[in-house]
Amino acid sequence: MNRYLDTLPHPWSRKDIETAIFKDFSDAIATIEETPGGRLWRALQDLEDTLWIFNTSTTDLLDEICLFGDRSKNFSFWHQANTNEAEEHTRAVKKKLFHCTSALMALVDHARNFQRKTPIAGYADRLAETFSSPGLHEFLQCLRNYNTHWRVAQANWVIQTEAQSKTRQARFTVTKGELLKWDGWSSGARQYIDFGSDDIDVYELFSDYRKHVQSFYAWHKGAVLDAYAGVLQSYFEYKRLYEGVQKKYAWNLIISHAPKALNPYQYLDQHLPRHQLERLLAYEHRSDAQVKALLQMVGMEEFCDEAMYEKLAALFRQTT
């Protein structure tokens, strides 16, 4: 059985959406969400969720390394009674390294799926330009397989002190010898390992790679919003109309049943963030201008009919 909006040609008017809400409000919003723009926006949000997981996993890993560096400055950290503490930090770094590589590959797979369904011109060129370090991307992809199918990479701490500058640096590294015990590296990943130093600095590796990731996906989101602006515009217009009509009914119900002695200022901070509340209070107290500003701030000026406006204005005109 078709839902009401499915039987109508695009574009849907406010009247179409209002009728759909009367018939079944849940069917109305479901139909709007299943428009091409709704599906695209949901897919973009899903991709951003995966990007967020990668970014937070990377932050957790880098923070753990910094935490070790700070705590290890304390002499008591190395007391015999605390011998397990350094080992626990090492395990924590290994665990978070595992999470980072898993999140990275999830991001790669989700981005490929997105590009397949929602292609962006210049995607491959931009990808190659952003991740230009030879073999880096392939190395991290294979490192995920190494962690998943072989064993979790052993990250070992190294503390270096520079005598002249009196600086101290705590690093976690993965050794070339440790990595090459696995035979699953691609040619590009092996090239990265072979031409790199004997110790790969975990902090440097993921700190630099995250910058590339953030640069690429900032470009990608902008390109999607530009290329598919028409598809998204109709979806957001339908959603705006749906939410406006729904809000109109809710507000009308509240205002119609409000006690005559109600002080509307008591409830403003439930609907307005602080900066909008401050702007509203800059208008003349209990004036029509203040009521109209309120309606504009909550996106109701288009949906508030004359009868509803008079009810709302009456609440503000009365004095306590």
Image: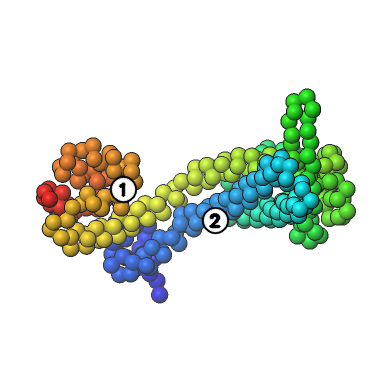
Q: Residues within 10 Å of mark 2 (few under 14, many from 20)?
A: some
Mark 2 = which residue?
A: 46
In this rendering, position of residue 300 left or right of residue 80? left
The part of the image, by quadrant, that contains residue 247 is bottom left
Q: Position of residue 98 (x, y in %)?
A: 71, 55
> Which amino acid lies under the numbered mark 2 shown in the image of this protein?
Asp
Q: Which type of secondary structure does the marked residue at label 2 adopt?
A: helix
The part of the image, by quadrant, that contains residue 197 is top right
Residue drawn at 60 percent across, 39 percent down: 215
How many numbered discs sit on the rendered protein?
Answer: 2
Q: Which type of secondary structure does the marked residue at label 1 adopt?
A: loop
Nearest the viewer among 168 and 12 is 168
Viewport quadrant of the N terminus: bottom left
Mark 1 = which residue?
A: 272
* Residue furthest out toward the bottom: 1
Q: Position of residue 305 (x, y in %)?
A: 19, 53
Nearest the viewer among 101 and 304 is 101
> Which amino acid lies under the numbered mark 1 shown in the image of this protein?
Leu
In this rendering, position of residue 304 left or right of residue 5? left
Residue drawn at 44 percent across, 47 percent down: 230
Q: Position of residue 78 (x, y in %)?
A: 76, 46
Q: Earlier in the sequence, mark 2 or mark 1?
A: 2
The Cα–Cα distance between marks 2 and 1, rounded to whole angstroms, is: 29 Å
Q: Residues within 10 Å of mark 1 (few under 14, many from 20)?
A: some
